[in-house]
Image (cartoon, rainbow, N blue to C red):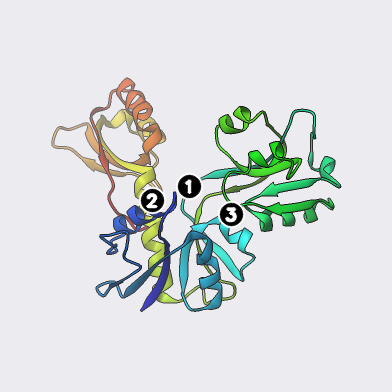
Amino acid sequence: MLRIAVPNKGSLSGPAGEMLHEAGYQQRRESKELRIVDPVNEVEFFYLRPRDIAIYVSSGRLDIGITGRDLLVDSGADAEEILPLGFARSTFRFAAKPGTATGIQDLKGRTVATSYEGIVAGHLAEHGVDASVVHLDGAVETAIELGVAEVIADVVETGTSLRNAGLEVFGEPIMTSEAVVIRRTGADAQEPKVQQFLRRLQGVLVARTYVMMDYDCRVEQLEKAVALTPGLESPTVSPLHNEGWVAVRAMVPAKEAQRIMDDLYDIGARAILTTAIHACRL
């Protein structure tokens, strides 16, 4: 039975549970549940603190896990990313009072406060910068005001909270993060149950990204239509009862579906429909 670690709370928990449900796996009904067994799919799920998941997976006690790339790197655990999942995206940046620094080299001899000591220390070492790193849990914006540090390193989304604290970001991003599937470094990547799990999640990602588009068009406009809807490999084209017309079916990116429908209509296509994809295998 495949043993999988899933975030039990925070921004990773809800989207991870939704994705697993869409992939056909049983999920917990109450947030207090810490372990459930899905006998049909031969999977056992363990609901753990997101920061601990990489440690459990690296120990070999659990086969794979879902966590953030930032948490994986920060843990220093002997685990590796095997599939990005596209949610819980974030960017890590340095921030300080205006005029304090313009780049990472300006941090030499300074003190940096962060909740992600492993990430920041590794980034500084990679750039040959000798600076002190102070670990703080929770909001780190007040570290500068209280004199604990001269610079902070934290997740930046809109930057509003930093501006409200009188801080500004500087330099290049430290890293970008998102939810990822991880495994113990060196574990068998071709293990059948693991591959099946990854295929299911990849199917969900594709289903969320594409829609199925159907339309009718004149034969003489088919090449133009196919150029607009090439599909993943090629579209399905079937003759209609009315001579000179064909029906076309292809997967198209969901974000571009409305524009493609407009373009198809302009070249004479009609009965243009889109349908959501609930599951797939490519």
Q: Are marks 2 and 1 in contact (CB under 8 Å)?
A: yes
Amino acid type indicated by mark 3:
Asp
Which residue lies under the disc numbered 2?
15
The disc placed on residue 143 is none
Q: From the viewer's perspective, is residue 118 above or below residue 219?
A: below
Seen at 68% across and 42% down, the residue is 143
Q: Position of residue 259 (x, y in %)?
A: 38, 26
Which structural element holds mark 2? helix
Cα separation, mark 3 vs mark 1, equals 11 Å
Could you say which quadrant of the image residue 77 lies in?
bottom right
Q: From the viewer's perspective, is residue 21 above or below residue 36?
A: above
189 or 147: nearer the eye? 147
Bin the neighbour count of mark 1 within 10 Å (Cα to Cα): few under 14, some 14-19, many 20 and up.
Answer: some
Q: Quadrant of the N terminus?
A: bottom left
Which residue lies under the disc numbered 3?
70
Q: Is residue 150 left or right of residue 203?
A: right
The disc placed on residue 88 is 1
Can residue 173 be seen from the camera position used here? no
Q: Earlier in the sequence, mark 3 or mark 1?
A: 3
Seen at 64% across and 39% down, the residue is 142
Which structural element holds mark 3? helix
Q: Position of residue 5 (x, y in %)?
A: 43, 67
Q: Are marks 3 and 1 in contact (CB under 8 Å)?
A: no
Cα separation, mark 2 vs mark 1, equals 8 Å
